[in-house]
Amino acid sequence: MHRHMPLVGAVSLAALMSAACGASAQLALSANDGKAVLVDGVNSVPANPPPDSVAVIDVGATPPKVVAEIPVPTSVVGPPSSVAIARDESFALVTGASKIDPTDPKKVVPDDKLTVIDLKASPPKVTAQLQAGKGAAGVSINRAGTLALIANRSEGTVSVFSIAGNVLTPVGKVTLGDDKSGPSHVAITPDGKAALVTRDGDNKISVLSIDGTKVEYTKRDLSAGVRPYGLDIHPNGKIAVVANIGTGSGDADTASLIDIEAKPARVVHTVTVGQTPEGIALSPDGAFVAVSVMNGSNKPKNSPFFNDYGLVKVFSVKDGQLLPLTEAKVGHWCQGLAWSKGNRTLLVQCMVEKEIMAFSFDGKELKPAGSIKLNAGPAGIRTAEP
């Protein structure tokens, strides 16, 4: 297993990326959870866990590579959208939904950490650690870089922060439901005027209105499937896609397409994808959507639903539908996905292997294109919004 250490020296990360990759330079951030391992289908805390970390990845390199690693509180709890990168790649936000129970090192309890990382520093560094809400999970930054929203799974709220430069100031919280409603991820529309929030606790997707730093629950909820979880919005703001993870009982689960332009917004198409779709990500041009499917790889080996591999599936987005295109086998308990510019590369996080698998994509097929080994389980990943 390779160890990736933070880069030091006089050369800035931006300069390094430019020299290595030219115009193709692009960052992805992987949030890695050291306090979670899978023991025969059970999420467990290992003895002497490695520290949580964030890996800064050059997606433009062939194969993609880690260029810096920073100790940051992270968590596999919640959807794998616990990272957000400002559109100009100047800073990033990372949530930590859980921490080791101070009274019992074999258990985890909800946490509220929100970490700010300066990506322009050499090496990248943490500039602030703030409190969001209990079970802070999915996080997004608007395109203008002036607002951040965080879904708090364990208290039924969304935290609102204003942003000036890379300094965050808490504005307040939006209450969606009780502490069982499970707000999981929040995605902001490209125009910055609305947001969608998945609620895996009560099977809803809530619509928020945004006016500056005033964020309100419109009381409009969509119904996509059982336990909506990961969510992504098309770069043109017309549609969104959501992964419905189901109950984990071995049944085939679904992904849905949302028509945001409809008055009111609504779910218009749903497809079956397999057992437990954790991550979902639209390509930068919005032509494709990738879904990471557990496929029973996180089940006990004696389970009738166990499979010794997960799947990554790619669908084309056409005429308001998700059309199956291609798929590939991946590792076990796999989490998030990230596309490179031009749809050329797809990264898939696999917790058990502590590995990010890279695939090349030609618009029709996925082909293995290397991998990145990490010291902790990769649990959340994003690139900047296109």
Image (spheres, grey):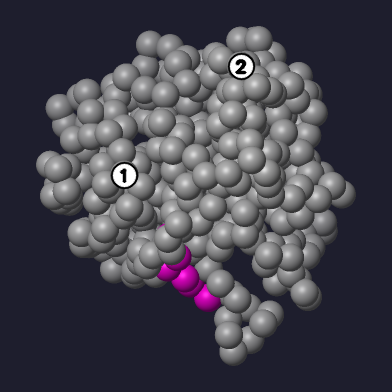
At label 1, the amino acid type is Gly
Q: Is residue 273 above or below residue 119?
A: above
Q: Which dot marks residue 165?
A: 1
Between residues 133 and 264, which one lies in front from this camera angle?
Answer: 133
Q: Is residue 110 left or right of residue 249?
A: left
Label 2 or label 1, whichever comes before in sequence order: 2
Residue indicated by mark 2: 22
Residues tagged 2 and 1 counted as in contact (Cβ below 8 A): no
Q: Is residue 68 left or right of residue 259?
A: right
Residue 350 in the image, given as x and y percentages of width and height: 71, 45
Q: Is residue 19 above or below residue 121?
A: above
Picture quadrant of residue 266: top left
Picture quadrant of residue 318: top left
Residue 275 in the image, given as x and y percentages of width and height: 62, 43
What's the distance in space between the residues labelled 2 and 1, CA to CA?
26 Å
Q: Is residue 106 visible in the rendered structure shown here?
A: yes
Q: Which dot marks residue 10?
A: none
At label 2, the amino acid type is Gly
Residue 341 in the image, given as x and y percentages of width and height: 54, 19
Q: Magenta segment, which residues?
A: 109-114
Between residues 131 and 352, which one lies in front from this camera angle?
Answer: 131
Residue name at image x 59 percent, y 29 percent: 15
